[in-house]
């Protein structure tokens, strides 16, 4: 099947058009695990299928590296917008992308060669609180929930950007033990559909240090929806201004809140296009990330 690998700030996915996978639609979780495997597949944080939409200009379906399907992906939205324009699936510079978590408006910024290094996406309204994400814990005050992690509690703001986020304001996001704490919160029984976990520390009112444990993919270099969720949480707490540069492991993302809507602007990068040899016997069940 013809595939492209793309990344945004090091958050990489394998992109495939829906006609390439028509015969194996029911096996997309398995395909996601397989292509994501760095040793036996291509190596990525998951799989994104690009297809036609009846309600938008293009549609994307995202699977994490463990094969679970997510509602949304900010870095994926920017890469899909770049792909759709460069491959001629759309000819406009502003268009809509359908995801399981909603329809989003994208604006591409093509260069003089007609390639698209940068994309802005309207990620929708700030949606905070336990009614916005699958949550089955005790009553919540100020959209914050305190989850027990070992001997301590970690407080996080619950935010939806189509997909669910737990945003924890910590002493130092950069040195946080993301690998140890992330999976405990991701799989905590209060979050029946699991949750993405962000560790954030404001450097100032306009700059935010950010690390993430992604549901279904673990530590990644960047999470677009996570960055948007974190800025929404920081703005609602009065800690951040409406225009914030988020410093992620893989680079910077600009997030702005205007008229209650969250706008994300950042890079989208094509790594390669090629033919992936999907072989039933040889590649089944080889994905290993859980
Ligand atoms: N990396 C993404 C988010 C991908 C989905 C997420 N792991 C989930 O399960 O909700 C982004 O850039 O937003």
Image: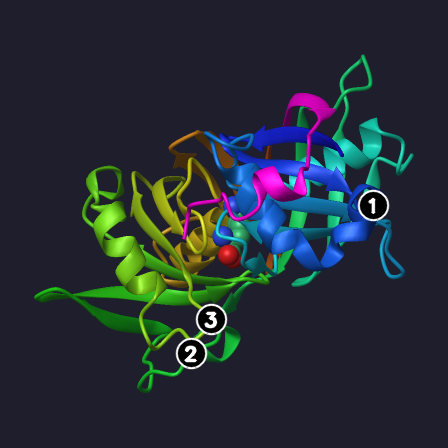
Tell me how far mark 3 sits from mark 2, CA to CA: 8 Å
Residue placed farthest to the front in the image? 281
Nearest to viewer (mark 1 / mark 3):
3
| Residue 246 drawn in magenta | no
The percent position of residue 38, horizontal first and vertical second, equals 47, 31
Residue 64 or residue 288, whichever sits in front: 288
User: Mark 1 Cα within 10 Å, few/some/many (few <14, many 20+)?
Assistant: some
Where does label 3 land, which residue?
193
Where does label 1 land, which residue?
95
Tell me how far mark 2 sits from mark 1, CA to CA: 33 Å
Q: Please, what secondary structure does the residue beneath circle 2 have?
A: loop
Q: Is residue 91 left or right of residue 259?
A: right
Q: Please, what secondary structure does the residue beneath circle 1 have?
A: strand
Tell me how far mark 1 sits from mark 3, CA to CA: 30 Å
The percent position of residue 44, horizontal first and vertical second, equals 52, 35
Where does label 2 land, which residue?
135
Relative to 116, does residue 133 appear above or below in the rendering?
below
State the residue at coordinates (72%, 32%). Answer: 3
Give the residues drawn in magenta, as a range.
269-290
State the residue at coordinates (42%, 53%). Answer: 230
* Callout count: 3
Residue placed farthest to the top in the image? 113
Q: Is residue 153 left or right of residue 109?
A: left
Q: Is residue 116 left or right of residue 125?
A: right
Sequence-first disc among 2 and 1: 1
């Amino acid at each position: 099947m013809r595939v492209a690998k793309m990344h945004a700030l090091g958050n990489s996915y394998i992109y495939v058009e829906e006609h390439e996978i028509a015969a194996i639609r029911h096996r997309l979780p398995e395909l996601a695990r397989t292509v994501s495997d760095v040793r036996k597949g291509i190596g990525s944080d998951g799989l994104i299928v690009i297809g036609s939409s009846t309600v938008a200009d293009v549609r994307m379906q995202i699977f994490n590296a463990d094969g679970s399907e997510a509602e949304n992906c900010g870095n994926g939205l920017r890469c899909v917008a770049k792909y759709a324009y460069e491959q001629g699936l759309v000819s406009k510079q502003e268009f809509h992308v359908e995801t399981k978590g909603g329809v989003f408006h994208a604006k591409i910024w093509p260069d003089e060669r007609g390639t698209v290094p940068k994309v802005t996406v309207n990620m929708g309204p700030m949606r905070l609180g336990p009614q916005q994400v699958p949550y089955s814990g005790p009553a919540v005050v100020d959209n914050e929930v305190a989850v027990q992690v070992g001997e301590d509690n970690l407080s996080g703001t619950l935010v939806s950007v189509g997909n669910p986020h737990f945003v924890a304001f910590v002493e130092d996001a950069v040195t946080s033990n993301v690998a140890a704490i992330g999976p405990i919160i991701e799989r905590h029984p209060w979050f029946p559909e699991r949750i993405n976990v962000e560790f954030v520390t404001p450097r100032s009112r306009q700059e935010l240090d950010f690390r993430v444990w992604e549901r279904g993919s673990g530590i990644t270099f960047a999470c677009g929806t996570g960055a948007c969720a974190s800025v929404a949480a920081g703005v609602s707490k009065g800690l951040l201004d409406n225009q914030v540069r988020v410093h992620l492991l893989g680079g910077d993302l600009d997030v702005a809140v205007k008229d209650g809507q969250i706008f994300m602007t950042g890079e989208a990068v094509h790594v390669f296009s090629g033919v992936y040899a999907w072989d039933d016997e040889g590649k089944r069940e080889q994905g290993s990330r859980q």
